[in-house]
Image: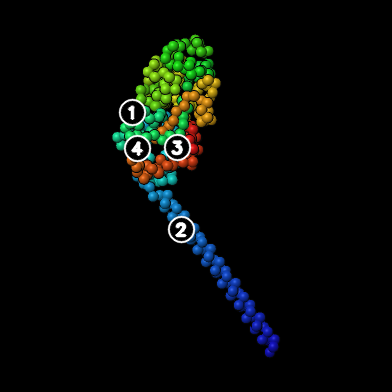
Amino acid sequence: MKRLKKVMSILTVSTVVAAALAACGSSTSSSSVAEQSSSSAAEESSAAEESTVEGNVATGGSTSVEKVIGALSEAFMGENTAVTVTYDPTGSSAGVTGAEDGTLDIGLASRSLKEEEVAKGLKETVFALDGIAIVVNNENTVEDLSLEQIAQLATGEITNWSEVGGPDAPVVLIGREAGSGTRDGFESVVDVEDACVYEQELTSTGAVMTAVAGNPNAFGYVSLASVDENVKAITVGGVEASEETVKDGTYLLQRPFVFVTKEGEELSAQAQAFYDFALSEAAADLVRNAGAVPVV
């Protein structure tokens, strides 16, 4: 009888312990499920917050910013699938005008705003820096020029490449059209406004590159971001155009890439979101990989 009572006692204790362990396991499992549900809800909420902006963002202007604005737009739209960012490459002056008359949410210029443009209530925000590369045909043996020599070549004071250590051949200047930000930047830095002797005045950076690549006597100026193996970028005063030399100021031929907006007027929610993204640290590598220099 005593042995029976002892066995029953052991069974009773075992049952209690097993029940306690089961309850504990159930509690842990419930807690884990609750935590997972909470985490999932938070992720869904976060995703919902990221998707709150929608609509179109119209940008346009400088052709020099094409690679940069393309990279920024693609990344932004990847994160904000309900937004479409458009870009119309019409030149810096058109970008300024579009921001002024409201046909563009954000104008794009590859130069600083002029006093008369600021007086119209426009403001600029620098979103990247760019070096203006001096490019020659790959057959040209010239490797380096000073700012003074560039000015003399551009104005026709020097008419033969042999005068600057190159081949015995005439100098042919290929440039951008009046109103181009690249042209304005080049002529301002080199101090040759309204004095250049152009063989051709073209309406895009790509057209300048093609013309220089096809003429062994030609030289021109283009955005650093646009330089490729079809032309040769020479050094200026012994300094190569690069992100480091543009950022530290040792490369003298440089200019800003700017957003042009109206002073005191709010952007649409989607335009503001794109504006903020382009100026964030998260966009720095996108700007850099597109060949320009980030400002953050």
Q: Give the residue at mark 2.
A: 41
Q: Earlier in the sequence, mark 2 or mark 3?
A: 2
Callout 4–callout 3 Cβ contact below 8 Å: no
- Ranked by sequence position, the earlier of labels 4 and 3 is 3
Q: On screen, 227 above or below 19?
A: above
Q: Earlier in the sequence, mark 4 or mark 2?
A: 2
Residue receiving disc 3: 71
Q: Amino acid at mark 4?
A: Glu
State the separation of the CA atoms marked 1 and 4. 14 Å
The residue that mark 1 highlights is 116
Disc 2 element: helix
Q: Earlier in the sequence, mark 1 or mark 2?
A: 2
Query: Disc 1, disc 4: CB below 8 Å?
Result: no
The amino acid marked with disc number 3 is Ala
Mark 4, residues whose alpha carbon is within 10 Å: few (<14), some, or many (≥20)? few
Q: Amino acid type of disc 2?
A: Ala
Q: Quadrant of the N terminus?
A: bottom right
Residue 250 appears in the figure: yes
Residue at figure coordinates x 62%, y 75% from the top left: 17
Most extreme residue toward the right, as rendered?
3
Q: Give the secondary structure at mark 1.
A: helix
Distance (Cα) linking label 1 and label 2: 53 Å
Look at the numbered disc 3 and give the secondary structure of its residue: helix
Tell which tag, 4 or 2, sits nearer the viewer.
4
Determine which of the numbered discs, if any, sits on residue 218 in the image: none
Task: Judge the density around disc 1: few (<14), some (14-19), many (≥20) Cα neighbours within 10 Å.
Answer: few
Camera-side residue: 264 or 38?
Answer: 264
Q: CA distance from mark 4 to mark 2?
A: 40 Å
